[in-house]
Structure formats: C-alpha cells, structure tokens
Image (cartoon, rainbow, N blue to C red):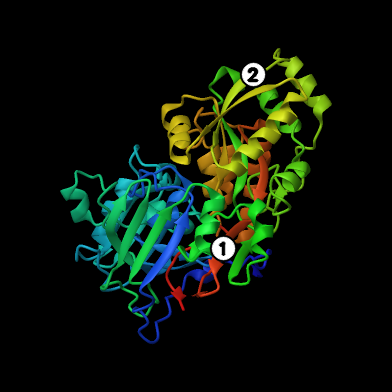
Amino acid sequence: MRIVKTMKVVAAAALMAAMLSACGGSDDKSAGSTTLRVAAQSDVSSLDPIRGNSGNDHVMLFPIYDTLVSFDEGLQPQPGLVESWDSPTPKELTLTLRPGVKFHDGEPLDADAVKVNLDRARAEDSVAAADLASIENVRVDDELVATLELSRPDASLLLVLADRAGMMVSPAALEANDNDVSRTPVGAGGWKLSDWKQGNELRLERFDDYWDADSERAETLRIKIITDPRTRVTAMRSGQQDIALDVQPVDAESLEKEKSVVLESQTSLLVHGMYMNTSAPEFSDAKVRRALALAIDRDTIVKNALFGHGQSASGVLPDGYWAETPDSVDYAHDPDEAKRLLADAGVPSLEFDMLSRSDTSSVRLAEILKDQWAAVGVTVNILPRDVVEATDQYFNQKSSPAYLAGWSGRPDPSMTYRSLFDAKGYYNVGGLEIDGMAAAIGAADKSFDLDERVVGLDAAAVAAYESTPFLPVAFQDALIARSDKVQGFQMNQMGKPKFIGITVD
C-alpha cells in the first residue's frame, strides 16, 4: 500500500490575491467513469444546505450544490459560481457570477437567485444565519452582479460563501416546495439527485448542463451509508466501493498490507471534543468545565485512541494551519488542579450523561475519557447513538447535557469561532456569552491580510480557553482510503472531498 501524505504546513497566501477571474477549461472530459462508488459513515441530515446540522453532510451536498466561492487544498478562496469578486469599500463585497450557469431544473443562476438564497440563509431558522450576520442587504446590480452591503468589514465572508451559505438552490424549486428542499434538492452542482434511500444510499446522476463542461465527472455517483468504519474499509478492499471515507486510525496499520489500496492522509481541522450545554446545571460553572479539561491526558489519547494519527488539542485549530491555536492556550494534564476546581465548585462527585457516536473508535475514545475523569471523581454515563440521532438529540432536542463528537471545521477560522462560541451560534447550545469573543472575531474580520487576522483569531482562542464552553481533546488526521484504480482524488484540510476530477481505471 502507498500512503499519500499531503503537506502539513500550508503557506498563508493573502486572501486578496484570490480576487481574480477564473481560468478557463481545456478539453471536454465530462464523460468520466461510468460509476464512482463512495462509502460514507453517516447519511446526510438534510439535503437542504441551510437545514442540516452535521459536518458529515458536506460530502453529499457538494456534488449537488456548487458554492459561490470554492477553496483549494489549503482552504484559500478560489472562484466558484462567482468568477471574480471585489471589495470597493470595507463594507461592500461585489460578486460577479459566471455567465450561462443553470440549475438542475434549467432555471438561470443569476444575481436575483443569489439574493433569494442569501436572504433565505440569513433567516433566523437557518443554520448559516450566524455566518451571514454582517450582511445588511443583498443588492442586485446587474443580471450577473450582486453586492453584499455589510454592517461591518467581514473578511470571513469569502469562505463563508464556500460553505452551506454559498450553496445555491433553485428559487423555482424553493417556491414549488414551500421553501423546503430537504428531500427535493435542486442545485447547480455537477450531479443531480436520482434516488435517496434514507439510511442506505444516495444516488446521483451527472448533470449534463453543468457550467464546467470540461470537468471529469462520473456518470453516476453512488454514496453508500456504511456506519461501521471497518465494514467501510472491507467494502473498499473487496471492490464493492472505490473510496472509503473517514477511515479510523485503528485500521490504518492493516491497510498498509494492501497493495491495491492508497491511504490519503492529511492534517485536518477535525477536532474531537465534548460539547457542553452551559445552561445545564452540570456545566453552568466554568470551574467544572475547566476541571474536566485539566483531567484529560491528551497525549495518551493521541497514542491509544488515534494510534498516532493526530495531535493533542487545547484549542479548535491545529498546529500547521495558518490560524493555528496560540501556544498560550494549553490545558496541561493536571488532575490535582482538576480535583481542587471541582471541590471549589461544590461538586467533588460530579455525574453526567454524555452522548457519543456508536462506532467502535468513538466508543473507545469515550471509554478512555470516562476512565480519566473517574480518576478525579467524575462519573460519566456514555450514551452511544447513531450520528444523526445523537446530533438531533443534543442540538435540537437538548435531551443530554453533553455530546462527545467531532467538529469537522469550516473553510474560514472565524466561522469555527462564531459557530462554536458566539452566543447565537447554532453549536453553542447553552447560548453562553463569552467575554471578549465578539470583539475578537470582529477584529479578525476587519482585514483580508492573514497576519492581521491572526491577532484577532488568537484573542478568540484565548477567550474560548478561559471560558471552556467546548472541551477540545485531539485533532485527528483526515484518513481516506481509495482503490489504486481511482485517479484524480484531491484532499483538503477540511477532510471533506469533492468528487469532480476523479476517474476510475
């Protein structure tokens, strides 16, 4: 087996340099391979991009919905449906669309469609609303030109538009389906929905009128839901699947014996951690939250749970990333201090329920944490669940005070801090207001210069560290296994591949 190790340190190129027109294509390659078969760990929570709540959704959303802005493997912005952009004033971002782009229903993707989508994504019931909070108005300037009028400078918007908020849905489909396309998606991506057997398989067919006619695209894209990670790998080894997503570190060693397998590996933004509902009595005291953080031996977890395929985490952005967590943010393993803090908080024998994903690797991590917390007098009741069920129970039903899961990252670091730590962020279930967080994110978003942005992002990291509303444990490398017959596969730091450009020999 060959291991492809992508460069871990990505050069921090200036964002303003991306404000260029897109390059043209070459020869027509759209015919591609007949079928590309992908094994994924969980089903999409919703095929409506602003309704879903799982980071695993993206591998199923990206093929259907092209985004206004794209990104490269180092998560720097690139042209997408928008071929160029400009910021004529600090509070304006002007987007110029590609001509001739069509939705799957044949409707044109124009500036009016962009306004409909962004206004919808800004609504209170949208999971993307917090990311678009700086937009006061979407102004249609021309058929292919729209300007975002902002309440403040917001450099994060470019990559916000490379995520859920930038996934364009046909306005005609929204009107026909009462503003809900959770089961009837109509985007402008390289594939369109053919069939969805929920919990089993998503089948997509190539969209022949896709704007990038030169792109290599399989005629059929089949994404099979295989929740057990070892079964995913077995299906790929046996030739039933071409790509296995979310390979667990425990399986990496055995894959080394497979000559026909390539293991793609890259430092990613995926951080394992525990979400805590800070409005629940178990976690309302910052001393308790910090005690739990200090009780964790992260190096042991990287060794025994991730088998060396990762790094310890005291923050939410990894070493080697352009906005990496500053060194001052460090939850050093200190069980004695953890016991003292619990005693000061009046809960020397804390007990709580914790949701966890039910796969073997997630349960292993949960058990290790349970043992480490038990050493400081804390009792944890682990509640293993399917990913979709656990996510719904914690974020929507709020039926458990804690959830051990992964934060899969976002294209722009401000999005991560905003989503996890803003008082109105979807993933901040307790609605905790963190001192200095809003100001830090605002400072990070004032400039497109990365060095200037880092100052604000470091301040956000420190604010989160001092409050501990989310408990980071360890970053896991993105591991994806593919048949050696698969060509053109490209990783990115989000660990969420797009399938355009892939062929199968």
x and y, in percent, of residue 447 in the image: 56, 57
What's the residue type where badge 2 is placed?
Glu
Q: CA distance from mark 1 to mark 2?
A: 39 Å
Tag shown at residue 179? none
250 w.r.t. 10: above or below? above
Q: Are marks 1 and 2 in contact (CB under 8 Å)?
A: no
Give the vertical position of 282 relative to 150 (above or below): above
Which residue in the protein does label 1 denote?
Answer: 481
Q: Residues within 10 Å of mark 1 (few under 14, many from 20)?
A: many
Crowd class of label 2 (few under 14; some 14 to 19; many from 20; radius 10 Å): some
**Circle 2 SS class:** strand
Viewer-proximal residue among 246 and 438: 246
Kind of residue sitting beneath label 1: Ala
Q: Position of residue 230 (x, y in %)?
A: 56, 52
In the picture, residue 123 is in which quadrant? top left
Residue at 27 percent of width and 48 percent of height:
183
- Residue lying furthest left in this view? 176
Q: Residue at x 58, y 48 (%)?
A: 443
In this rendering, the answer to whether 489 lies above or below 155 is below
Residue 318 location in percent, x, y? 67, 52
Q: Position of residue 244 (x, y in %)?
A: 51, 59
Nearer mark to the viewer, of 1 and 2: 1
Query: Can you identify the residue that label 2 sits on?
Result: 351
Residue lying farthest to the top in this orientation: 346
Label 1 SS: strand
The reply, left or right, for residue 29 in relation to residue 377 is left
The residue closer to the viewer here, 409 or 241, is 241
Q: Tell me, yes or no, if residue 88 can be seen here.
A: no
